[in-house]
Image (cartoon, helix red, strand yellow):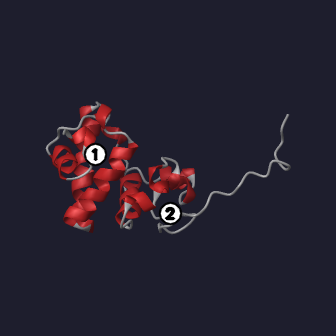
Amino acid sequence: MTYLDSSGDQLLAAFEAGAIGPADFPHERHVRVAWLCARAYGRDVGLARLEAGIRRIACEAGRPEAFHVTITRAWFELIEAADDLDEHEDLFDKTLLGRYYSPGRLDAGREHWVEPDLRPLRLPPPRLRPVDCAAADVA
């Protein structure tokens, strides 16, 4: 079994050893690694280890500017609150932070932490509002 098909100790060890490259780190794996960091190390150390690993992956991809302080911490805080990832499928939705942050507010948090401006970072996430088809302009 390799880290790519594991969901526990091997995945975290591979992440921390720098064995996971940019192509092998989609959102689903970000979520699982963040959850594992929180469980293994607690909030502060887990977040620091996650940040270090994501920064390394961004640098390896030639895009160190891609690291975003607020996005990383906000995801970590939401994921850390989940006792069981299987009970929180919304965490695997890459657009989830849009329920907590407006685009401008999130953009402002690239280099430093900013609190959400729409709703507090809590699980379960706020529900998406259904689209009112009658009110939508369909031309």
Is residue 105 at least partly visible in the picture?
yes
Question: Nearer the viewer's eye, disc 1 or disc 2?
Answer: 1
Q: Secondary structure at mark 1?
A: helix
Label whose residue precedes the other's in the sequence (1 or 2): 1
* Position of residue 76 in the picture relative to residue 49 (left or right): right
Tell me where residue 57 appears, x and y as whole percent: 26, 39
Residue 67 lies in quadrant: top left
**What residue is pinned by disc 1?**
54
Pick the quarter of the image with the N terminus: top left
Front-most of 57 and 68? Answer: 57
Judge whether 30 appears above or below 38 on screen.
above
* Position of residue 135 in the picture relative to residue 50 (left or right): right
Name which residue type carries label 1: Ile
Identify the residue at horizontal 26%, vertical 57% (top origin): 36
Tell me where residue 40 appears, x and y as whole percent: 20, 62
Pick the quarter of the image with the C terminus: top right
How far apart are the two marked residues, 1 and 2, measured between alpha carbons? 21 Å
Name which residue type carries label 2: Pro
Q: Are marks 1 and 2 in contact (CB under 8 Å)?
A: no
Toward the front, the furthest residue is 1
Tell me where residue 97 appears, x and y as whole percent: 50, 54
Residue 76 lies in quadrant: bottom left
* Position of residue 41 in the picture relative to residue 89 (left or right): left
Which numbered marker is on residue 116? 2
